[in-house]
Amino acid sequence: MAKQTTTEPLTISPEKAADKLGLSPSKIRQMLHSGILPGFKMDKRWLISVKALEAWVDKQISGI
């Protein structure tokens, strides 16, 4: 098992993303299923890259 070198996780759950964005977990899952929000499935769990989420938010803010 690889040793994690940072204190921050590389990925977060839809529940944590929902908390960060001020949305419901069901809305986050809906956005993941539709491809609006970047994420991937590991078995049956959705995971969201923290860096990809931050980039997505920046893109929404800048309107690009």
Image (cartoon, rainbow, N blue to C red):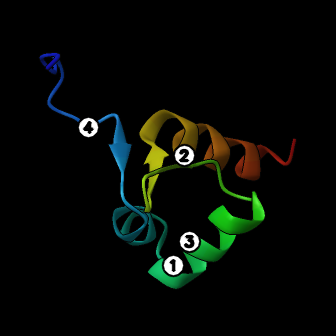
Q: Which of the two discs, 3 and 1, labels the residue nearer the N terminus?
A: 1
Residue at screen point 59% across, 80% down: 27
Label 3 vs label 4: CA separation? 19 Å
The kind of residue on which mark 3 rests is Ile
Indicate the secondary structure of the residue bearing disc 2: helix
Q: Which of the two discs, 2 and 3, labels the residue nearer the N terminus?
A: 3
Which quadrant is home to the N terminus?
top left
Residue at screen point 49% across, 34% down: 51
Q: Quadrant of residue 17?
A: bottom left
Q: Which of the two discs, 1 and 2, labels the residue nearer the N terminus?
A: 1
Label 2 vs label 4: CA separation? 13 Å
Residue at which label 1 appears = 23
Residue at which label 2 appears = 53
Q: Position of residue 25 (x, y in %)?
A: 46, 78
The kind of residue on which mark 1 rests is Leu
The kind of residue on which mark 2 rests is Leu
* Disc 1 versus disc 4: nearer the observer: 4
Q: Which mark is residue 28?
A: 3
Which quadrant is home to the C terminus?
top right
